[in-house]
Image (cartoon, rainbow, N blue to C red):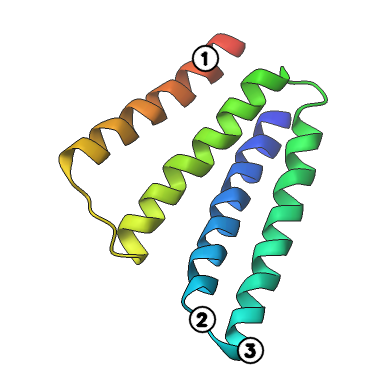
């Protein structure tokens, strides 16, 4: 069950980074809504990460959490923020995803 909490925490990390990216270009009320979304996603992500680390090794949990967030943020950047999707970026994105899967696999 704690692996599920960890994966959801990683998804909320992607959410808080996406909100931060949208807040960067927003003004007025929209800016504050994006900041509120950022804070909500941040708090939820941290709470779920804390819950997951109660039974999972902290080093593995943190690496998987940041890996999900990093990979997801790159994908969101490519899809929604017009960041480049060149071969080198995609190659290292896939090696990162492979490393996350590997950590899950060796951690039981």
Mark 2 nearby-residue class (10 Å; few <14, some 14–19, many ≥20): some
Which marked residue is nearer to the observer: mark 2 or mark 1?
2
Residue drawn at 72 percent across, 63 percent down: 39
Closer to the chain start, of discs 2 and 1, is: 2
Q: Position of residue 62 (x, y in %)?
A: 64, 28
Q: Which residue is mark 2?
A: 26
Left or right: residue 71 versus residue 26 is left
Depth check: 84 or 6 in front? 84
Q: Position of residue 85 (x, y in %)?
A: 22, 50
Residue 52 can be seen, yes or no: yes
The answer to whether the residues at label 3 and label 2 have Cβ atoms under 8 Å apart is: no
- Which quadrant, please, contains the C terminus? top right
Q: Which residue is mark 3?
A: 29
Left or right: residue 48 versus residue 31 is right
Figure check: 12 above or below 7: below
Whole-number angstrom distance, CA of label 2 to CA of label 1: 41 Å
Which picture quadrant has residue 87? top left
Figure check: 33 above or below 81: below
Mark 1 nearby-residue class (10 Å; few <14, some 14–19, many ≥20): few
> Which numbered circle lies on residue 79?
none
Dot 3 falls on a residue whose secondary structure is helix
Residue drawn at 66 percent across, 35 percent down: 6
Which picture quadrant has residue 9? top right
Q: Position of residue 86 (x, y in %)?
A: 18, 46
Q: Which residue is mark 1?
A: 105
Whole-number angstrom distance, CA of label 3 to CA of label 2: 8 Å
Which marked residue is nearer to the observer: mark 3 or mark 1?
3
Mark 3 nearby-residue class (10 Å; few <14, some 14–19, many ≥20): few
The answer to whether the residues at label 3 and label 1 have Cβ atoms under 8 Å apart is: no
């Amino acid at each position: 069950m704690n692996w599920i909490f960890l994966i959801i925490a990683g998804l909320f990390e992607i959410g808080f980074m996406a909100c931060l990216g949208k807040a960067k270009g927003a003004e007025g009320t929209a800016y504050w809504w994006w900041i509120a979304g950022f804070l909500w996603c941040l708090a939820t992500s941290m709470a779920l990460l804390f819950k997951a680390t109660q039974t999972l090794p902290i080093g593995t949990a943190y690496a998987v959490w940041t890996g999900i967030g990093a990979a997801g943020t790159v994908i969101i950047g490519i899809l929604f923020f017009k960041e480049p999707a060149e071969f080198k970026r995609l190659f290292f994105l896939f090696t990162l995803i492979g490393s996350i899967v590997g950590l899950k696999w060796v951690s039981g």
